[in-house]
Image (cartoon, rainbow, N blue to C red):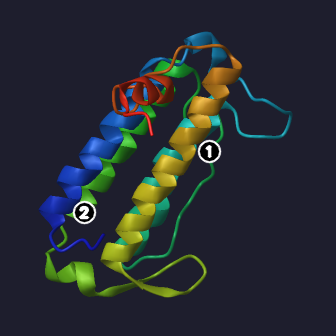
Amino acid sequence: MEIKTVQSFIDYYEKIRERTNRIIAVVPPEHIDFTYKPGKFTIGDQIRHIATIERYMYGETIMGKKSAYPGCGKELADGYENTVKFFNDMHIQTLEIVNNLSDEDLTRKCLTPANSEISVWKWLRAMIEHEIHHRAELYIYLNLLDVKTPQIYGFSAEEVQELSVKL
């Protein structure tokens, strides 16, 4: 997928974010600090990580600055409500940055934290892939807790199989 206009990117990204928001909405507040193994991200860390990478790595680098990723610990936002607010605030800030790009800016190069040059549009595409990756991890965490999670496109795999033709 090539991103040719800022508006088409934002339209697509907002659909991605809606799906992420649906999974975050079913996180039981009492499980915000759940992790499957000591030393691994908690549910809250996952949410804060999506937020801080979006804003402080991708947002900064598409502005031509160095990554300023601060991590994803509780010092950024503690508890369910504060974490969700932080997540949404970081997204709003990133959208402001993206909205300041011109369509021509999408083809210019930016530097990743590894000092690799990449087109801004490809870097924005990577930001979406990053969010989807961590959203999938949230699904796994919640499944481990037996929390009913929303279907991403409205049907479970079993429902799609049932609706499919038999070969």
Neighbor class of circle 2 (other Cα within 10 Å; few <14, some 14-19, many 20+) is many
Secondary structure category for the residue under label 1: loop
Counting labels gives: 2
Quadrant hosting residue 127: bottom left
Q: Earlier in the sequence, mark 2 or mark 1?
A: 1
At x 84% / y 33%, what residue is drawn? 37
Quick one: which residue is furthest to the right in this view? Answer: 38
- Residue 22, percent from left and from top: 38, 26
Residue 72 - label: 1
Looking at the figure, which quarter contains the C terminus?
Answer: top left
Residues 82 and 1: in front is 1
From the viewer's perspective, is 133 left or right of 159? right
Neighbor class of circle 1 (other Cα within 10 Å; few <14, some 14-19, many 20+) is many
Residue 101 - label: none
Look at label 2 and name its amino acid.
Answer: Val
Q: With respect to residue 88, does 101 lie above or below?
A: below
Q: With respect to residue 132, does 167 lie above or below?
A: above
Q: Are marks 2 and 1 in contact (CB under 8 Å)?
A: no
At x 18% / y 74%, what residue is drawn? 4
The answer to whether residue 7 shows anywhere in this view is: yes
Residues 43 and 145: in front is 145
At x 61% / y 81%, what residue is drawn? 114
The answer to whether residue 48 shows anywhere in this view is: no
- Residue 75, percent from left and from top: 63, 36
Residue at mark 2:
98
Secondary structure category for the residue under label 2: helix
- Residue 30, percent from left and from top: 63, 11
Marks 2 and 1, how far apart at CA: 22 Å
Look at label 1 and name its amino acid.
Answer: Cys
Looking at the figure, which quarter contains the N terminus?
Answer: bottom left
Quick one: which residue is furthest to the front in this view? Answer: 167
